[in-house]
Amino acid sequence: MQNVVAELNKFDLARGFTEAIRASIDYVLDGARTGRFNLLSDDVHPGERASVGAKLEYEVQRVFQWKKAKPLDVELAKSPVDLKSTVGDNWAIPKEAHCHLCICTQMRLKDSMHRTWLIRTHRSWLYRGKGNNDGKRGIAVDARNNWGVPLYDWTSLPLNPLTLLSENQVSQVFELGRGQEARLLRLFSFLPNRVIERSVILTVCAGNDDPMRRARAIKQRAAKKGLLLLCGTWVSDRAEAEAHGFTLRPGDWVAIPGGSKAQEQAVGSGLLF
């Protein structure tokens, strides 16, 4: 365990797991096809929420470049290590991982938080009984608290900007029959001074052709409404965004209110474009 902890300390675990969890959630929501953006929404099946953990195993390996290795998931410091995660309060440890080292991640979706431990899952530390039909058993809370090694404390997950919209604003941004450009203008007007990732635009325009071209097409219309619309794809826009205190990656967007005070107030009020 000490060797594995030393190996893990070489990585920025909180940042890496944050990236992996966000990618897993985005994969399950499949916003570019379904238009979904909130994992806790009623249109997301509980089984889909549970599948975030299964996807996370592969995303963690991708982020940290840990290679798949038998008999468990990965090998760290020449020791087999299993990767487990839960959106609940406990993990289901299969027979093959009993008495082995496990990296256990807990996701608290309602609070957009996560944390991770390293623990050796001794059978004496697992809940008594036969477990479920696969022989999986949960970890006793006292054992986790007393013998688990916290890898990082509760860490925030980045919020999808669409979750910040009011119910009325959501209905306007996703209005059926309304063109992509009009709905994207509404999106940027409702969320000024907030970085909008490419995935958000794809979600708003789910099922439509070439939404990024539509976003580029509205820059002049946005300017007439008092919004400086910048895209991280262009060097000049990234420099302009930096001057306003925003760091844009390629594909990121930000709408910065400009022009008269009246225009800024109109933008902040959620006035329809």
Image: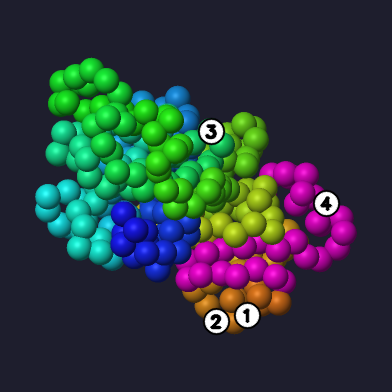
Q: Amino acid at mark 3?
A: Lys
Q: Amino acid at mark 1?
A: Ala
Residue 135: name its quadrant.
top left
Q: Badge 3: few (under 14), some or many (20 or more) residues near its Cα, within 10 Å?
A: few
Residue receiving disc 1? 239
Q: Which residues are magenta?
A: 244-273
Look at 44% across and 52% down and name the residue there.
151
- Mark 4 or 3, nearer chain start: 3
**Mark sitting on residue 265:** 4
Q: Badge 1: few (under 14), some or many (20 or more) residues near its Cα, within 10 Å?
A: some
Look at 73% across and 45% down and name the residue there.
271
Q: Amino acid at mark 4?
A: Gln
Look at 27% across and 20% down and name the residue there.
128
Q: Is residue 191 above or below residue 63?
A: above
Q: CA distance from mark 2 to mark 4?
A: 29 Å
Nearest-to-viewer mark from 1 and 3: 3
In the image, taking residue 2 as reference, residue 188 lies left or right, namely right
Between 175 and 111, which is closer to the camera in this rendering? 111
**Mark sitting on residue 110:** 3
Asked whether the residues under the numbered discs 1 and 3 touch, taking CB atoms below 8 Å apart as contact, a structural biologist would say: no
Between 74 and 100, which is closer to the camera in this rendering? 100
Which type of secondary structure does the marked residue at label 3 adopt?
A: helix
In the image, taking residue 17 as reference, residue 62 lies left or right, namely left
Number of marks: 4
Q: CA distance from mark 2 to mark 1?
A: 6 Å
- Mark 4 or 1, nearer chain start: 1
Q: CA distance from mark 2 to mark 3?
A: 37 Å
Q: Is residue 54 magenta?
A: no
Which type of secondary structure does the marked residue at label 2 adopt?
A: helix
Residue receiving disc 2? 235
Which residue reaches farthest left?
70
Q: Badge 4: few (under 14), some or many (20 or more) residues near its Cα, within 10 Å?
A: few
